[in-house]
Amino acid sequence: MGKLKVLLVEDNYMNKVLVREILTINGYEIIEAKSGTEALKVLMTERPDIILMDLHLPEMDGITATRIIKSEERNRSIPVLALTASAMKGEEGNILNKGFDGYVAKPIEVKKLLDTITLSLGERKKEGV
């Protein structure tokens, strides 16, 4: 089995560099998109194992992009994690109700990011995907 592929949808340069570095060092292959619209285009040709989606993006926000991704049968099983600076106490349910499979709060904490990805991919393996 090759490297696990992560689609990173993030428009903030520093956040993108940080997440890319963390994941690359930990053996993930990274595909990048700067907007929800670009993420949808990438999904036409790529098949990531997991998607990290910023909520506030140009052109199309992360919530709208996630709804579209999850509405397509071939993408439904791909876990989508929200990357958000607005993960206040009590917000988790709100984020999950919008179609996300989990979330990672900003500023990014390395261990939490890796643990959340591992947990989400583990759930996916249990489902036999």
Image: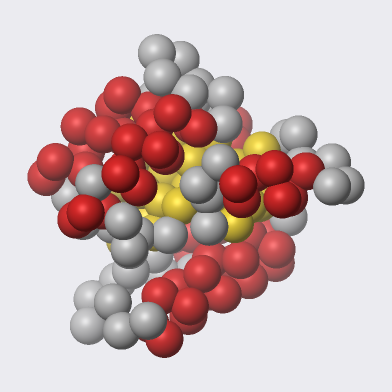
Q: Is residue 58 left or right of residue 78?
A: right
Q: Is residue 74 above or below residue 119?
A: above
Percent x, y of residue 22: 55, 57
Quadrant of the image occupied by residue 68: top left
Q: Position of residue 120 (x, y in %)?
A: 51, 69
Q: Nearer the viewer, residue 126 or 1?
A: 126
Image color mode: secondary structure
- Res. 121 image quadrant: bottom left
Residue 108, position as x, y percentages in the image: 70, 48
> Could you tell whether 8 is left or right of 83 in the image?
left
- Residue 57 in view here: yes
Residue 8, above or below 59 = below
Using the image, determine if residue 15 lies above or below residue 58. Answer: below
Residue 8's spot in the image, x, y percent? 42, 44
Please state, as top left, top right, bottom left or bottom right, where the N terminus lies in the image.
Answer: bottom left
Residue placed at 21% from the left, 54% from the top? 73
Left or right of 33 on screen, residue 94: right
Q: Residue at x 48, y 78 (%)?
A: 123
Q: Residue furthest right?
A: 89
Position of residue 63 in the picture relative to residue 37 (left or right): right
- Figure disc tally: 0
- Say whether residue 19 is visible: no
Q: Quadrant of the C terminus?
A: bottom left
- Kindly identify the residue that appears in the image at 39 percent across and 25 percent down: 35
Of the pair 117 and 60, the residue shown nearer to us: 60
Residue with the most extreme top position: 59
- The residue shown at (41%, 70%) is 27
